[in-house]
């Protein structure tokens, strides 16, 4: 039964509301200015987040809105994601493709796999780069 004076708040509405809290006036910021600046002016690496994690979803929405404002200053970023092995393979493939396309609009690439091997490889490459520069 339709309620004339009722409203529907979707999950996206809630995320947008939460993001708007982070974008309040500079006199009363939820996220300090230097953190907001760093988020918008550097490459980011997201490790250990689930697509069901509200913190991740709110942060991604905020970054995507911010990137629309700063199209000339886009920085590439990377998100390490685990596949949902409980999901049927065809549905999982569609969900993974959706996430890749969704995040690519903000120049965020997705690496599918466990964080530990990725971080071990990253550590190895950083060590190799430091050795090559004599920074060890």
Image (spheres, helix red, strand yellow):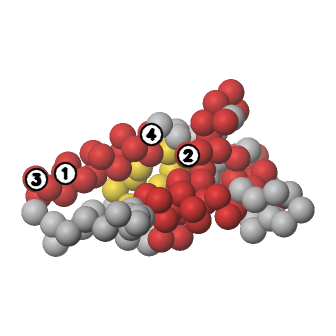
The residue that appears at 70% across and 47% down in the rendered structure is 40
Q: Secondary structure at mark 3?
A: helix
Q: Which mark is residue 104?
A: 4
Q: Secondary structure at mark 4?
A: helix
The answer to whether residue 10 is above or below residue 107 is below
Q: Which mark is residue 39?
A: none
Res 101 quadrant in image: top left
* Residue 71 visible in this rendered orientation of the protein: yes
The residue that appears at 82% across and 57% down in the rendered structure is 25
Q: Which mark is residue 93?
A: 1
Q: Rate crowding at label 3 as few (under 14), some (14 to 19) or many (20 or more) other CA atoms within 10 Å.
A: few
Determine whether label 2 and label 4 are within 8 Å by CB: no
Res 26 quadrant in image: bottom right
Residue 132 located left or right of residue 50: right
* Residue 123 visible in this rendered orientation of the protein: no
Q: Residue furthest top?
A: 72
Residue 108 x %, y %: 50, 45
Distance (Cα) linking label 2 and label 1: 23 Å
Residue 47 located left or right of residue 90: right
Residue 91 located left or right of residue 38: left
Q: Nearer the viewer, mark 2 or mark 4?
A: 2
Distance (Cα) linking label 1 and label 3: 5 Å
Q: Which mark is residue 64?
A: 2
Question: Looking at this view, is 63 or 115 the one in front?
Answer: 63
**Circle nearer the N terminus (4, 1):** 1
Image quadrant where one finds the C terminus:
bottom right
**Circle nearer the N terminus (2, 1):** 2
Determine whether label 4 and label 1 are within 8 Å by CB: no
The residue that appears at 47% across and 59% down in the rendered structure is 13
Distance (Cα) linking label 2 and label 3: 27 Å
């Amino acid at each position: 039964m339709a309620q004339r004076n009722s409203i529907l708040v979707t999950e996206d509405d809630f995320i947008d509301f939460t993001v708007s809290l982070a974008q309040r006036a500079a006199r009363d910021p939820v996220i300090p200015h230097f953190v907001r600046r760093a988020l918008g002016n550097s490459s980011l690496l997201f490790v250990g987040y689930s697509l069901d994690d509200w913190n991740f979803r709110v942060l991604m929405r905020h970054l995507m809105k911010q990137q629309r404002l700063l199209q000339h200053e886009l920085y590439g970023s990377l998100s390490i994601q685990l596949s949902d092995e409980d999901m049927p393979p065809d549905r999982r493939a569609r969900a993974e493709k959706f996430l890749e396309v969704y995040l690519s609009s903000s120049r965020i690439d997705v690496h599918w796999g466990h964080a530990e091997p990725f971080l071990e490889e990253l550590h190895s490459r950083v060590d190799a780069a430091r050795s090559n520069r004599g920074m060890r």
